Amino acid sequence: MPRFAAVDVGVSSVLPVAETVRLARAAEALGVRRFWIAEEFHWRSSTATAAAVALGTTSIEVGLGIVSPFARHPGVLAMEAATLQELAGGRFLLGLGASVIGLLRHRQWGRVRIARGMREGLGVVKRLLAGETVSFDGEVFQLDRARVGFLGPGGARVPVHAGVLSPRNLEMAGELADGLLLGIFCTPEFVRSCLGHLRRGAERAGRSVSELEVGMYALLAVDRDPAAAREAVKETIADYIAWGEVPEERAEAIGMTREEYRGLVARMTETYGRGDRAGMRRAVPERLVDTLAIAGTPEACARALLPFAEAGVTRLIPYHVLGPDRERGLETVVRELAPRLL
């Protein structure tokens, strides 16, 4: 069975910055090569957190995965990415995605405009990071003689990965991006579908899909006590449901009717509003742990994850929970899970 090329680590920006830096240092000491920070709205700034991680480490690559050109103008993102690359001494990567879908829907952005904005945003960021002076009058974004002033002729050399899911955006990623970042809650079948669209875009641009890294976040908790691992992921599952990050369209895939799922969302939202974390964990059905997370012993997690490598994922990103105790979980991921995946 195919294996992953690398096992990275990722965390959410809900964590205190000091904890994120501590985890990044621990990951670096364990030999992890890449550390991703995912931005959640409205929590801690991922760019500020990435700066702290870059200054607090020496060798591990630091990735923003993902930030949105709809939340920060592409001109601002390029400026921040170039600065982070300077701080990291060449270790920085940028992941771009729509991300704030709830905000975009609230502002009545259509799918076509989101796709157009992603294409424009990613293209503008790459040009600015290459050191170009950019004048651009797009449907979504505009710039007038913009340039990142401190870049030399070679630019910042920041790899730009696309965190996208729709067919149109996946084809765009195949054309323009340096890699693909898939989010949590994927299935191997969905990964194969995504890579088909990615391949079409790459071929249209005269590229091979093998040139692109394919990363995937996996909401994961690993522990020798499988019950403790399963319990550990429930709070994060509950958060994502309460935040509207698991769309109603996924109801059937997770074994629920839409009516049942709407009821679950209502309960999660109510308990989240009361700050009842224990109540949120209790409200998560066991079947959601099976369908939305990878949780259990190292052996069980490896069995669940290897089909994603077979589907075409090259870099696995164990995400956020890691285990009942996050730092101990990180060590278990590196010492006991990763050797079964590489």
Image (spheres, rainbow, N blue to C red):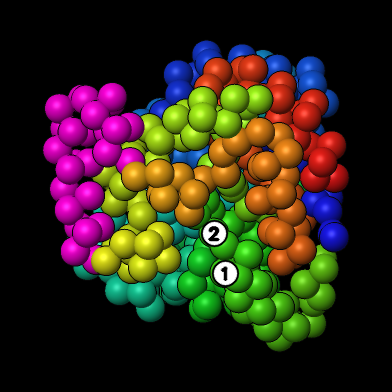
The residue indicated by pointer 1 is 190
Inspect the image, locate mark 1, and give the three-letter code of the amino acid beneath it.
Phe
Residue 340 x/y as whole percent: 82, 41
Label 1 crowd (10 A; few <14 / some 14-19 / many >=20) = some
For mark 2, does the 10 Å Cα neighbourhood hold few (<14), some (14 to 19), or many (20 or more) residues? Answer: some
Q: Position of residue 136 (x, y in %)?
A: 49, 68
Spatial CA span between label 1 and label 2: 6 Å
Residues at discs 1 and 2 in contact (Cβ within 8 Å)? yes
- Give residue 186's mark: 2
Query: What kind of residue is marked 2?
Result: Cys
The vertical placement of 191 against 97, above or below, is below
Q: Is residue 43 magenta?
A: no
Residue that appears at 68% across and 83% down: 200
In the displayed structure image, the side of residue 175 where residue 52 appears, left or right: left
> Magenta residues, as a range?
258-284
Q: SS class of the residue under badge 1? A: helix
State which quarter of the image contains the N terminus.
bottom right
Q: Report if residue 263 lies within the magenta region.
A: yes
The picture places residue 278, in percent across and down from the top left corner, at 28, 24
Q: Is residue 160 visible?
A: no
Residue at position x 53%, y 72% in the image:
169
Q: Nearer the viewer, residue 9 or 309?
A: 309
